[in-house]
Image (cartoon, rainbow, N blue to C red):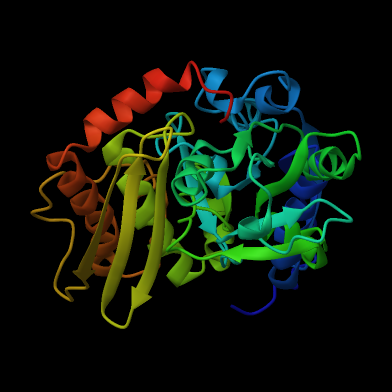
Amino acid sequence: MPADTSPDMTTMKVGSRKSQLALFQTRFVISELKKIFTSHEFEIVEMSTLGDNVLDKALSKIGEKSLFTKELEVALEKGEVDFVVHSMKDLPTTLPPGMVIGAVLEREDPRDAVIIKSGSTSKCLADLPNGSVIGTSSLRRAAQLRAAFPTLQFQDVRGNLNTRLRKLDDPAGPYSALILAVAGVSRLGWSDRISQYLEGDLCMHAVGQGALAVECRDEDRDTLAMLANLHHRDTVLATIAERSFMKTLEGGCSVPVAVNTMILDNGVSLHGGVWSIDGSTSLKAKKIVNFVEDDDLDGEPTPAKKCKSNVNFAAVFAELLPHSELIAAERCGRYLATELIGRGAEKILREAKEANNDVNVK
């Protein structure tokens, strides 16, 4: 799309959390928009969310799905901001009425990383002595890694990335290592602290991890048209598949659900699984759904949710992409989840939610 050189100046208000990473991500989205809409100005409106303010509990125990998004969405609903920028993994699979994801930007590395305590001679999790404490804010990570490293202890660690790194490197602190998302560490320029990248056979990543999502009002056609320029086709399809998988399972941060996704030449491949809290029980499967050129919304067994602007998939609105591809992505996630439910996933997830009340990790 050619650059917008209109002399009319438009100022848009952009909602963001206050953390260093959130502001970095919001400024990045704005910079991408300003490359195209040169006459627009953007004002960041910083906010704190429940997840930012409650730091004495594991996230999975707070009992709220929209931990890092609710306050931003309230401002969006009131018209106090025009759109908000999120880490996509923070966004629930069902958004409040009237909200939609108008842009999904190209995904950074979705893997998890091991950060070893400064001064340690260990290079990876396998090097750590028995009983070493690993800090993680994720039930998903802890469940998968408990199965692979039963001699390690996993303990919740809260705070933004800067805070967590300080807790790790504190000589009197309990942590020997942290598990963090590669994307966040890299965006803040700390890639040199990464000791080990966790591949999918060891630790599958979270739904939406590594992707940025921009949320706006579904009736705001002008903003939707603007944000559509930021969509990255492969990331849109991958995250729709993942979010459809999560939505069908009715999972969230209080249960261990993980995925790996590939966009093929003619379809979507999704590998997903669910785990018990202690990692001793799991169900995993893989599903491939091909694109069908003449596929459209007619005849879809479970119609996609309608929004005022058109149709969205797992809350992602991407009208410029072929519906056949969007439908295939949504079906891939739904079919995989349905298969796992048929094999007993609901029992594992129900027991995981119950067990979470007695486990000190997210």
Q: Which residue lies furthest to the bottom in this view?
A: 265
The residue that appears at 23% across and 37% down in the rendered structure is: 345
Q: Quadrant of the C terminus?
A: top right
User: Camera-side residue: 90 or 171?
Assistant: 171
The residue that appears at 23% across and 32% down in the rendered structure is: 346
Q: In which quarter of the image is residue 324?
A: bottom left
User: Camera-side residue: 203 or 286?
Assistant: 203
Judge from the rendering whether residue 83 lies leftward or rightward of residue 334; answer left or right.
right
> x%, y% of residue 131?
65, 39
Q: Can residue 193 be seen in this view?
A: yes
Q: In which quarter of the image is the N terminus?
A: bottom right
> x%, y% of residue 310?
34, 50
Is residue 218 placed above or below 353 in the rendered structure? below
> x%, y% of residue 273?
33, 49
Judge from the rendering whether residue 117 lies leftward or rightward of residue 282; answer left or right.
right
Count of numbered badges drawn on the protein = 0
Is residue 133 placed above or below 66 in the rendered structure? below
Judge from the rendering whether residue 297 lies leftward or rightward of residue 38; answer left or right.
left
Q: Can residue 313 be seen in this view?
A: no
The residue that appears at 65% across and 19% down in the rendered structure is: 57
> x%, y% of residue 82?
65, 41
